[in-house]
Image (cartoon, coloured by chain):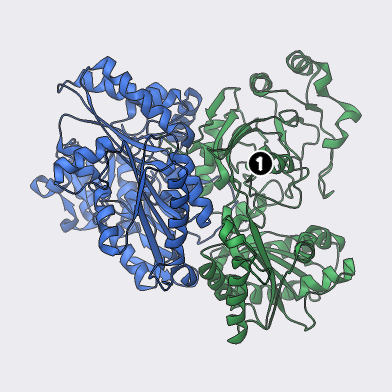
Chain colours: A green, B blue
Amino acid sequence: MATEALLRRFTQALGPAHVLTGGDTAPWARDWTGAYQGEPAAVLRPADTAQVSAVLAIAHEAGTPIVPAGGRTGLTGATHAPGAVVLSLDRLSRIREIRREGRVAVVEAGVVLSHLHEAAEAEDLSFPLTLGARGSATIGGLLSTNAGGPNVLRHGNARDLCLGIEAVMADGRVCDLMGALHKDNSGYHLRDLLIGAEGTLGVITAATLKLAPRPRAHATAMVALPALPPALRVLNAVQDATGGAVEAFELMPRSYIEAWAAHTGGRRPFEGDWPVTIMIEVATTSDVDAAPGPQGQSPLAERLETVLAALLEDGTLGDAVIAQNEAQRAEIWARREAAAEVTFARRPFVDTDVALPLDLVADYLERIGPALQAIDPGVGELVVAHLGDGNIHYTAYPTRDDAALKDALREAIDALATRMGGSFSAEHGVGLSKRASMARHKDPAALAAMHGIKAALDPKGILNPGKVLP
Amino acid sequence: MATEALLRRFTQALGPAHVLTGGDTAPWARDWTGAYQGEPAAVLRPADTAQVSAVLAIAHEAGTPIVPAGGRTGLTGATHAPGAVVLSLDRLSRIREIRREGRVAVVEAGVVLSHLHEAAEAEDLSFPLTLGARGSATIGGLLSTNAGGPNVLRHGNARDLCLGIEAVMADGRVCDLMGALHKDNSGYHLRDLLIGAEGTLGVITAATLKLAPRPRAHATAMVALPALPPALRVLNAVQDATGGAVEAFELMPRSYIEAWAAHTGGRRPFEGDWPVTIMIEVATTSDVDAAPGPQGQSPLAERLETVLAALLEDGTLGDAVIAQNEAQRAEIWARREAAAEVTFARRPFVDTDVALPLDLVADYLERIGPALQAIDPGVGELVVAHLGDGNIHYTAYPTRDDAALKDALREAIDALATRMGGSFSAEHGVGLSKRASMARHKDPAALAAMHGIKAALDPKGILNPGKVLP
C-alpha cells in the first residue's frame, strides 16, 4: 500500500494533476474482459521518460511495487493492480519522428496503434502490426506483450517490427537502445529480452519501429476444405505462387462459423456445410502487380485465382471465393474480427492461445476435443486460428461454472500443446492467467534462468510483481 | 590451467580419443585471420548434448573456464583460448530432421553451413543465411555470433532464422527451447539472449531453423551512381517495384573496385570511372515470375530492368548492367565475395564492422575519411558494405604498424558511428577485439544489465571468460 509520504514524493515529481487516487483510478480498476477487477492505490501519469525515471527511482528506494500500464487491452491480467501503484504511460503519446526514406518511426510508449497507422499512411508507408484492439492498444503495451495478430505471418510480431527501444530500469536508470539499426551485435540482446517481459524487467518508454511500404493492392479469398490436414499445403502453394505475399491465413472452422452466424445473424461464407474454411489475404507493394488488367483484376488477384483454381481442380479445396471489391473484402475481415466478441458472448468460457508447429496443428485439433470430453462430457468448443503461424485460439465452454473444472480444461489444452512441442502462450503472454502453466510446462532450466535474470535486473522485485514468473 | 585430475574427469566423460592435448590441439591454436594465436591446454570433443552437459557440470564444479568453439571463422577472437580448455562442438554434426511441409530443419551445433544448404536443397527448400566461410562455419557458431551476410536484407540474420535452440547452461543443466514455433510468448526470450552471446551465457548444442522455399529465379545487376546519397532511393524503388524481392544490395565503391582489380586482375564492372557501384540481386519463389518469356527473360528480370531503366532515365543511375546468364551472375558475386581476401591482402589493417541507420550511411562515409586523415595523414581506406542493412565494413590502412595508432583509428571509426546513432559491431560480434568499444560506447545502463545477466546465468564466470563484456 502506498503511504502518504510516498504519494507526496510522487506528487512532487509529477505534479498533483498526474497522481490519481480514489475514484479517479476507476479506468484502471478493471480490464476490458472484466475478468480482472480491483482498485489501484494510485495511478501515476508521467509526461516523459525523465518522469518515468523519477517515479522508478522513488519506488526503488522505497521498495514499492509498480504496475506499468498501456492501453490495458491485454487478455492475461498483466496490468491487474488491486491496491498497487499503477504507472500509466498514456501521456507519453508523441510520435517523435517518421523518417520516410529510412522507413522508421520513432514513437513514445503511449502512442495508440491506430494513430501510428494513420501517421505512417500519411507518409505513404505502413506499420503492419494490427489487431482488433488497435484503437486502444499502445506501442508500449504491444511491445511489452510482444503482440501478434493476423499479419504476423508476413511481417512478424511486435518484436520483429522493433529496431530499438528506450527503457527505464528498476532503479530509474534509463537504458538507451534506440538505434534505428537493422544489425547490431554489440553485446547481449537486451531489446528482445525487455520486449515481451510484460513490464517485469524494465518499463519501455519509447521505440524505433520499422515501417513497410504501403500495399498497393490486396487480394482476399475464402476457401473451404473437406478437412484440415491439407491446409498447410494450401498455404505453401499460395506462398510459392505469390512469392511469399501471404499476409493472413486465418482458420475459421465450422465451430466458429456456426457461433458467429448465431451471434451476428451474418451470412455464411459458403452454401455447402464445410468443416474447414480459411481466409487468405495476399498483398503487394508493386505497382505492376497491383495494376488492374482489362478484366479489372490485378496480376496479384490473377495469381491467387490461378493457384486456387489448381487446388480446386485437384480436390484439395472444396470451394473458393475471391473478394471482387472492398465491400466483399470488408465482409470477410469482419467475420474474422468478430472473434473476441463471439468468443466471450457465451459463458462460462476458458479462452486459450496455444502455438503448435505448423505441421502438427491439424493433429492437435483432432486430439484436443476428445481429451476435453473425457474431462467434461458435453463441453463446447470454438476454434479460430492464425493458421499460418500455428497459433490456435481454442475456447472451451464447460458445462458448469466451476473454477476447478475450468482449470482442468485449461490444463488439458496447455498440456497437450506442450507435449506436442507447442506453447501454452503464443501471443497473449503470461500475465496472471498463465503463471500456473509456466510452472507446469516451462522447461525447468529456462525457468531458473528467468528467475535469475529477474533477480539481477530487479533485485527488489518492484516491477509488476507476481506477473509472468511462477 | 587444467590440472591432471580435471583432465582425467573429462576423459572419463568423453573417452580418451576425444580429449586432445599438446600438438593435437594445433587446429584450435590460431584463428583463420592469424590475429589470435595461442595453444589451448586441452580440446574436448563431446559427441552429444549429454556429453556437453557432463563437461560443463565438471567444469562448473571445478570453476574451470571453458571456451566453446565451432568452425572458428569469426573475426573478433571469440574462440581465442591460450592455456584454456576448448569445448569443440564439431562432433555434434547431425542434421536430425528436415520437415518439408513444416519448412524447418532440426540440426546440431556442429553442422557446417554448406551441409545444411545442401540438405535443404535436396528437399527443394533453402536455408537463406550464407557467407564466405560457409564451408567451415557451423550452426552453433553462426547462432552464437548472430551471423549476418549478404542475404540479411531479405531473410534476417541468424537470430531471425532460428525458431528454437537447445543450450547447456553453465552448471550443465540442459535448457530445451527447441520448439518449431513461429509464436511463443511464454516468458522471457531466452532464445534471443543466448543467440549472439558468443558462448558466454550458455553453449548452444542444437537448433530448430526456418527453411524458405528455394528461389525459382534470380536477377542480378550492377549499377553505377555518381554519388552515394541516392542509393537508398534506388533500394526503395527496387523493393517497391518487385514487392520486396531484394536479396542483396551490396556497395562496392571505387576504393573497393580499385583494390579488387589490383589484387585479382579482374575486369571492372563498368567502363566509366564511377565513385559508387552497387550489386543488386532480386529473387522469386514464384514459377510465374521465374518463367522465361519470349525474349528469354523472366518477369522478375523484366521488372528489375524496368525500374533500373527509369532510374537511368531520371539520372539517379549513371550506368547499369543485368547479368544475362549464370556465368555473368557468378562474376558479379565473385567480385563481392573476394572482400575478405582483398581486405586482408594489404597490411597493416584496421578492419571494422559498423552499422548505421540506413539514411545516414552516406553521411558517415563522407565524414569518416577526413576524420581518419586528421589522425594519420595518408591513411588508406577500403569500403565494402551490406548497404541494404546499413552495415559498413570499413577498413583503414594506417601508414605504420603501430598499436596505438591502430587503436586510435578504430576508436575514431567506432566513435563516429556511435555518435550518429550507429553501432560499432553490426554482425561480427564483440569477442576480444571490440571489448574496448563496448566499454567506451555501450549505454552504461545496458552494460550494467549485461553484467547482471552474466553473473546470474554464469555465477562462477566459467563460460568464455573475458569475451564480450568489458
User: Total of numbered circles in the picture?
Assistant: 1
Q: Residue furthest front?
A: B313
Kind of residue indicated by mark 1 = Ala
Q: Residue furthest top?
A: A12
- Asked whether residue A438 appears in the rendered view, the answer is yes
**Disc 1 residue crowd, few under 14, some 14–19, many 20+, Cα 10 Å:** many
Q: Secondary structure at mark 1?
A: helix
Q: Is residue B92 left or right of residue B151?
A: left
Q: Is residue B139 left or right of residue A317?
A: left
Q: Residue furthest left?
A: B23
Q: Is residue B52 left or right of residue A314?
A: left
Q: In the rendered view, would you say B306 is above or below A263?
A: above
Return the residue at label 1: A120
Residue nearest the observer in this picture, A278 or B82: A278
Please give the name of the residue rendered at 36% of the width and 49% of the height, measured from the top-left corner: B320
Q: In the rendered view, would you say B467 is above or below B172?
A: above
Q: In the rendered view, would you say B123 is above or below B50?
A: below
Q: In the rendered view, would you say B255 is above or below A35?
A: above
Residue nearest the observer in this picture, A49 or A318: A318
Q: Chain of mark 1?
A: A
Residue nearest the observer in this picture, A364 or B391: B391
**Could you say where residue A154 lies in the image, as x and y percent from the top left?**
57, 57
Please give the name of the residue rendered at 45% of the width and 27% of the height, measured from the top-left corner: B447
- Asked whether residue B211 appears in the rendered view, the answer is no
Quadrant location of the N terminus of chain A in the rendered image: top right
Determine the image quadrant of residue B427: top left
**Could you say where residue A407 lies in the image, as x and y percent from the top left?**
74, 60
Determine the image quadrant of residue B431: top left
Residue nearest the observer in this picture, A302 or B360: A302
**Could you say where residue A178 lies in the image, as x and y percent from the top left?**
54, 31
**Could you say where residue B100 lies in the image, as x and y percent from the top left?**
45, 72
Determine the image quadrant of residue B438: top left
